[in-house]
Each structure stands twice: as C-alpha cells, then as structure tokens.
Image (tube, rainbow, N blue to C red):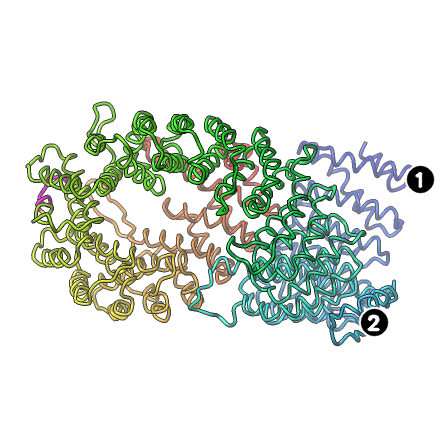
Amino acid sequence: MINKLCEKLLNGKDQHRDIASIALKTLVAEVATQSLAQSILGSILPKLTYGITAPVTSTEIKCECLDILCDVLHKFGNLMAVDHERLLGALLSQLCSNQASVRKKTVSCIASLASSLSDDLLAKATVEVVQNLRNKGAKSEMTRTNIQMIGALSRAVGYRFGPHLSDTVPVLINYCTSASENDEELREYSLQALESFLLRCPRDISSYCDKILHLTLEYLSYDPNFTDNMEEDTDDESLEEEEEEESANEYTDDEDVSWKVRRAAAKCLAALIVSRPEMLAKLYEEACPKLIERFKEREENVKASTNDPRVDLFNMSWGWLSETGINSYIHMCCSPRWLLKQEVPKIIKSINRQLREKSIKTKVGAFSVLKELVVVLPDCLADHIGSLIPGIEKALNDKSSTSNLKIEALIFTRLVLASHSPSVFHPYVKALSSPVLSAVGERYYKVTAEALRVCGELVRVVRPNIEATGFDFKPYVHPIYNAIMSRLTNQDQDQEVKECAITCMGLVVSTFGDNLKVELPACLPVLVDRMGNEITRLTAVKAFAVIAASPLQIDISCVLEQVITELTAFLRKANRALRQATLGTLNSLIVAYGDKIVSSAYEVIIIELSTLISDSDLHMTALALELCRTLMSDKRSSSAIGLAVRNKVLPQALTLIKSSLLQGQALLALQNFFAALVYSANTSFDALLDSLLSSAKPSPQAGGVAKQALYSIAQCVAVLCLAAGDQKYSSTVKMLTEILKNDSGINSAKQHLALLCLGEIGRRKDLSSHAHIENIVIESFQSPFEEIKSAASYALGNIAVGNLSKYLPFILDQIDNQQKKQYLLLHSLKEVIVRQSVDKAEFQDSSVEKILKLLFNHCESEEEGVRNVVAECLGKIALIEPAKLVPALKVRTASPTAFTRATVVIAVKYSVVERPEKIDEIIYPEVSSFLMLIKDDDRHVRRAAVLALSTFAHNKPNLIKGLLPELLPLLYDQTIVKQELIRTVDLGPFKHIVDDGLELRKAAFECVDTLLDSCLDQVNPSSFIVPYLRSGLDDHYDVKMPCHLILSKLSEKCPSAVLAVLDSLVDPLQKTINFKPKPDAVKQEVDRNEDMIRSALRAIASLNRISGGDCSLKFKNLMNEISKSPALWEKYYSIRNE
C-alpha cells in the first residue's frame, strides 16, 4: 500500500497526488507500534528521498515529499539513526534550491531531523550552514534561508547548539549591521536566532550578551523611512484633537516592513532581560531609557512587543526587591529601584500620550506597564496622579472602549488607590468617582466586579479615618451607597459580583454609617439575607466583622439577634474557612455590642465553641479560646456563663494543654483563657491550679506527658498565679519550693514541673523575696535525671531574668567555681541573654565585661555542647551590644585555635536575625572577615562559615550580595568529595569507612539551596550544575536529598541552564531510582531508600515540566523506563499530582 501511494505521489496525476499525500500523512499519524513503524520507514524513506533530490521532480512534488518527511521525522526520528546521514545530506542540498517554498519546507524538515541527530551530524549540519553564510557572493534570499535555518536548529535542539555559538553569533551580528537598507527580513531573522540562543543556550551565550544588548538597543529604534520630528514631548491637552487628526493622516507605507526588525529587537531584548538576572543594573542603566523613548513607536505590533521588555524589566526588579528586602541602612544609588525611580516622570509623560491615542491595544498595553510600575514602586505616582486621571476617565467613559481596556484601567486604579496616601487623590475624587460608579452598572460581570473593588478603595480614600475633617466626603456617600445597593439587591448576577458587592457594602456601612442612619434598616437585612445563602455566607460573615470593628459604633440592633443566631449555627458547619470567620466576627460583635446581646445566647455560643478546641487545628483553637475569653470578660457575664465555661470549655483546655503540638498563638490564647477564668465569677484559683498541676501526672493509659506539654503547663501556671494576686502567687512559690526540698527523686515528673513553673513565674515576677531560692534550684543540678538538670538550668536562667542585679552575678560566680556544672550554668546564662535580646533590654556595662570574659574563656572548650552554647550567648549579646561585640569577635577570627575561630563564626550566625537590628550597620563592613573563613584549613571552621553564610542568605541577603562573586567559588569547592577527609576505622572483624567531610558537603548544598531563593541574580547556575550539582546527585544519601531539591528549584527558576546539561544529569538520577537495598537490609535502610527514590522522582517530575526537555534522548529514555515500571510509575504519578 505504501509503495502504491508513493508511486501515485511521485508519478501520478495532480488529483491522485493530493489524495496519496493525504493518505500517507494519515498513515504516519496513525501508526502506533514500533515494529510496524520500522517496516513502513523501510518503504517510505527511499521514495521520499528520491522525490526530494531527483533533478526531474517538480516543485509541487518536492514540497509534498518534504511535508510528509517532516511528519515522519517528527514522529519516528529516533528509529532511523542509520539513515540520518543520508537524509541530512539530501536535505542540506535543498537549502540552495531556487524555489522559496522548497527552501522553507527544507528548513522545517532539517529542524525536525535535528532533535534526533547525533552531536557529530548536528555539527556537520551547522558547519555547512555557517559556511554558506560566510560565502560573500551568495544571493540575499539564500542568506536569509540559512539564517532561518540556524534559528530553527537552535529552537529544535536547544542547549545542544551551545558549542556552535562561537561560529554563528559573530556571523549573525555582522549580517545585522552590514545588511543593505532594504533587507529587513535578514535583520529580523538574525535577531530571532539570537533570541533563541539567549533562551536556550544561556551558558554559552554569556560572553556575547553585551554585544547583543547593544545590537537590540540600536535596532529598537530602527526606522529608516520615517524621520521623527517630535523632539519635544508635550502634554498640553489643547493639542489633543490636533494630534488625533495628525495621527489619522500620519505617514503610512504598506511596503515598509522595518517594524518587523523593531519587533524582533524588542523580543530579543525581552529574552535578554528574562534570562540574565545578573545584568539587571546594567539593563536599567542602558535599556530603560531606550525603552521609554520607544513609547513613541507608531506601529501597533511593535508597541505591544516593546511593552513586554518593559514589563519584564519591572518584574525582574520586583523579584530583586522582594528577594533582597532593601534595608534602609544600605541605600544603593545604583539599585534597580533607584534607577527606575529616576525614569518615572519620563515614563508617565510617554504613557499619557499613549492613553490619548485611539488604539485600544495601545491603551491596554499602557495600563499594563503602569500596573507593573505601581507594584514595583508603590509610591512612585504621587506627583503624577492629576495627569493620569483624564486617561482613566477616557478609558472608562469612551463608547469605543472594550471591556478588556476597562478592566485594565480599573485594576490599575485599584492598585494606585491602595498604594498611595489618600490625600493625594482628594482633589480628583469627583473626576474619578463618576466613571467608576458608572462602571459598577456595566453589564459584563468582570468589569462590574473590578469596579466594586475600586469602590472599596475609594471609600477608604474618601474618609481615611473617622476624626479627619480635611476633606468633605459627604457628597460622595449616597452616590457610592446607591450604586452598590443596586448591585447588592440584584439576585440575578455572577457570584464574583455578589461577593464584591457584599464586601464593599460592609466597608461603606463601617466608614459612612453615621451618614446612612436612614438607609441602614433597608441595607442591613439584605446583608443578613446573604448570610443565609450558601454561596455568599462567608463573604457576608466577614462584612459583619468589618461593620462591628467600626469606630463609629454603627447601630445594628435591628438585625443583631438574627446575626448572632445565624453565626452560632455556622460554628457547627464543616466549612473550616466559615468557622474561622464566624469566630472572628462573633468576637468583634461581642466586644462592640455585648450589652445588647442576651446572656442565653452566650451560653449557646460556649457550648458550640467548646467542640472546636483541640490540637488538630490550633488556629481554630486560638480563635475559639479568644472568643471564650471575650465572653467571660464581659462585665455582664452571669454566673451561668462561668459555669458553662467550667463544664464545657475547661475540660477541653486541660486536654489541649497536654498536647506536644501546642505552641504560638494557641498557647498564648490558652494562657489568657486561664487568666480570664480566675477573674470570672465562682472559679476557685486553688481548684484551677490543682487541675493544671494534676494534668502533668502520667496516666496509666497514655504514659508520661510530653516535654513540650510540661513547658505549656508551667506557662499557664505562671499566668494563673500572677492573675490571682500576690497572696496566691506567694503561696504557690512556697508550695513549689517545698516539692524541690523534699527529696522526691523517685517522682521526677513532679520535680520537673515544679522547676519549670518556678522559672516561668520568676521570669514574669521578681522572686528575690523568697530567700535562697537560687540555691534550692541549683541543688537539682545533682539530680540523676537529665531532664531535671535541664529544667533546673532553665529555671535558674529565667529566675535571673526577673532580678538581674541579684541573680546574674550569682550565675557568673558559679560558672567560674563549679567546673562540673559548667554546661548547665552556661545554659542558664543563655536563657538570660536570649530573653534580654528578645525584650531589647540592656545589661550593665560591668556585667557585659564579666560575661564576655567568661564566654571567651570557654571558646576553646573540648566539649562541642559547651562551644555551641557559648556561641549562641555571644551571638545574642551581639544583638544587645553590637559595638563591643563585633570588634571582639573579629579579632578572634585570627585566633590560632580552630575551635575559637569556629565559635566566633557560629556566634555571628546567631546574631543574624530576620528583623532589622542595630548590629546590621556595624557588621556590614566586617562580614567578609567572618565568611572568608570558608577558606580555613580546619573543616569545623569551614562548616561554621558555610552555616553562617546560609543564615545571612536567608535573613539578610543584602549584607552579602557584594561578597558573593568571591564567596561562591569557595562555597562550590566545599561540595566536592575530599579524599583526605575519608578515613578507615579498623573494628577488628570488619573495617568501617568514615567520611569527615559529609556534614560539610551537606551544609554547602543546603546553603546553595538558600542562595537560589534569595540571591538568584548573583548565582550563575550554569557553572554550578556541572560539575558540582552533578557530583552531589551521585553522593551520599544525606547529600543527594538537598541536591534533588536544588535541581527542582533550578528547573523552575533557570530551566534553560538545566536543559543545557540535562544529558549529564540523567545517569545519577537513573542510578538512584533503580538502587535496590541488600536482602538483609534493616527496615530503616529500606525506608531511607524509599524516601530517596521519591525525592529523585520529584526532581525528575520537575525536569519533565521544562519545555524543550524532549530534546534530550537520554531523558526521554529515562521517562520511558519509569512508565514501564509499575512500582516507579505509581510513585511518580502520585508525586506529579501532589
């Protein structure tokens, strides 16, 4: 059948040829099995090759053959490796054909073949094409075809084209600059090829980036047939009509295709911006002014393309800002943000002219640029609002405006209202409100929803706070209210519009409620009605929270009872978001209108919320306890409410306190709950204390209580004591010290809790009135139980926080004199210092001197535990006294003792916290002295420096950005397996290999992972992936895991760099997923191997998401192997769908 069809194709009549061509294409598309494909290829390839190369063949037949061959190659290119060379030769000869259609189809054919060619044949094809290009005597249409061929090859083979760039890029740049004035297509194709190189070969193109940047900037304004005489921009509105007439009669020439060159240059520049984050500052300096200048572009298609690089540039700088979190103390005058700010007036001037044009597409593009500008520089338009208002008005009011333009204009208006000071807009509220309110009445739901969101921002702008009287907001109250009310009452509309109307009405009532007293009885029942609808109830609940929180104390008595009933019922619903919002709204309502709610309603609420208190949802628990406290603290709370809380909520709270998960907001809410319970009627302090202490007793069923639970109980006991007054607090401390005095070494849980309770009470209140309490606590250092010793050191530290002048000298004295108790005493000192650094308190100078002397003496301790505590103490003191500590730490970086050097670097790590601190300015010039210890001879010091670099990268990346070019090669060096750190330990019957460098390598890879999040613009992924990441993927279990994470991250953030070396990454991943543990391996080893396989499959799933990954034959084969293995495919499938 194939032979007959080929015969018809090559020698048949015209109508038979068309039928044969369609039949062959259908056959190729439908063949599914490999064996059938092989037999078909055997018949079809010689015939097609003959049809393409035979001199007697007509152009039509050649084109049909090339079309079919293109399909064959695309689908079965890998199956015909033996024919590749013959096919390539046949196709390359057709690039010189005199027929343009043949050349064009040949380009597509070679591109389809290229993805399955070997590297040698790919090189052969490229060399031949480049030689054709270097032939000066060639016709210009041949040259254009060859340039197209290079672009198509690059797009087909991706990163594999990298080695040939040194031959091709200079030739393309040369053609661009030396082509004749009329040869626009040649320039366009050259720029398109360069764009492809930038996106697909980032590593190999690096050295040409500057040349390409200058080339694109030159051709961005390439317009040889048009002289621009608009030297001076003008924003004079009176010239608007004149301009419009001019634009209608302006120069047009249908044969002028120079715009294609400008468009290709813009796209090439966009590729450069997206693929080279490290060039951001240079791009701002050189490209930004040019892009702003090109706002005057006259061709529609180019306008859209020049907006892409502008938006990309703003987006990149937003990434730069969010990743680095610019700190006030390092004001970088060359930062992208600063550079962009200088250009804002020019940008606005150009955009205003675009907003006055007739073209809808141009105006949409202008608003998208403005939108990005506001996101990146939130306060940059304060001086330009007045000039932008006419453009917004025109976009919303003009009859020719499309809904797309209106949505863009409204989104920009919302962003600009939200990001600038309200007073900026007050002169323009009248001009703005009218088009926005008319947009609320639009028929298209997306425009209406966006207009309602803008109304919400407008409400805040018109009356930013209740006391302010500088602006008369009253004329706008009723128009805004009426526009929203008409949408709120209309049932027949989209859910998005309903939700926006409810949210907006909540804002209107809470902001203008004192001017809407007549309207409220009509409006509030509508909001209550929306609470009854499943689709809108969540939004309505949140709206009532906004109304309740209003400082105007809106009168909602007409619906209050109904609202409380509805909300109480919502606490039983399965919808978590609804329950959360309900708890918050009830809290606000009871705070604002508690005196108007009947107490029987309170009891029902308590019964409902008691079921929400558990450690399975701590956020919900915190909200429920907070609401319970609000109910109890209400002045009118009756004894019945106290009783309901004791019967329903207290048992739940006492169960919750035993949870090892309890922390943060939920723990704080629980403490406040116990404090409120003491104040409420008929609740005995002694009974509460007893129930708290007894909750720490081990139960026969559950065994002992978790360590974390003991800390939670101790904190609640402390809060309870302080809330109950001095007498109760005093008797509790006596009772706790008695427990410690009685030698109850057997019942260690009781002693443990007593120590923690004393610590928590001592931190909150001075215990010096209880004589010798410090000696009683220090006695417990002798306990045989480790947890008691630890609790005693915690207690001593916290008691010292309550009275530093008395207890701190005692601790320092003990550290000097009690050698055996040193580690525990240092922990006590750490508690003191950490508390002081968190509370921003100051030490006395004499105390600091003593502490430092003592700590520096212990820097060289042989015990790692002691050194770590010393480092943490030094780091936290550095937060309190940076001027003293930073120089003292710096001096010790040159200490001859390795342990001291490592300790001071770890100390610096502890001093780098997420929030801004006064140490930041002092340590900034000295950072390199600490981090350059990554070159140290001792592996402990190197690891300490890597850990410190990791912390800097996570918390304060700006402090290290300038050092990264020097630090990164040193960091990468720490990821390599060092043979000198591997030793063999002889254990008699067998030998054990110990790798001392493992922890260092693991830390180094984890540091790179952090740097990819915070300093991506400084990291050159191409130089890291091979050889460093490649070797990590083949390393020990502990190193592979972070490497898989890094690979997933790079696949997402720098896909082109990963594609460039994909082949070399396949082997280690394949080895990992196919690894089988020994038959006698223990369960732990089997589980670890399973985790490792899942981790590798997660990285493979990320690689598979990269477009262009199918260029790698090795990766394709790996994916085939996974799909054929049921066990691997099941894991891969579940990971992919996570």
Q: Is residue 376 visible?
A: no
The local crowd at label 2, few if under 14, some if 14 to 19, many if 20 or more residues have their Cα within 10 Å, is few
| Mark 2, secondary structure of its residue | loop
Residue beneath the point at 23% across and 63% down: 898
Q: Which quadrant of the view contains residue 711?
A: top left
**x and y percentages locating residue 673 in the rendered image:** 31, 37
Magenta-tinted stretch: 779-785
Residue beneath the point at 75% across and 67% down: 296
Residue beneath the point at 52% across and 71% down: 334
**x and y percentages locating residue 1100 in the rendered image:** 51, 43
> Where is 653 relative to 51, above or below?
above
Along the line of sight, the residue nearer the viewer: 488 or 930: 488
**x and y percentages locating residue 358 in the rendered image:** 80, 59
Q: Is 780 part of what is drawn in magenta? A: yes
Q: Quadrant of the N terminus?
A: top right
Report which residue position mark 2 lands on.
225
| Mark 1, secondary structure of its residue | loop
Along the line of sight, the residue nearer the viewer: 456 or 102: 456
Q: Is residue 211 left or right of residue 701?
A: right
Residue beneath the point at 36% across and 51% down: 1002
Report which residue position mark 1 lands on.
13
The outermost residue toward the front is 518
> Where is 528 relative to 344, above or below?
above
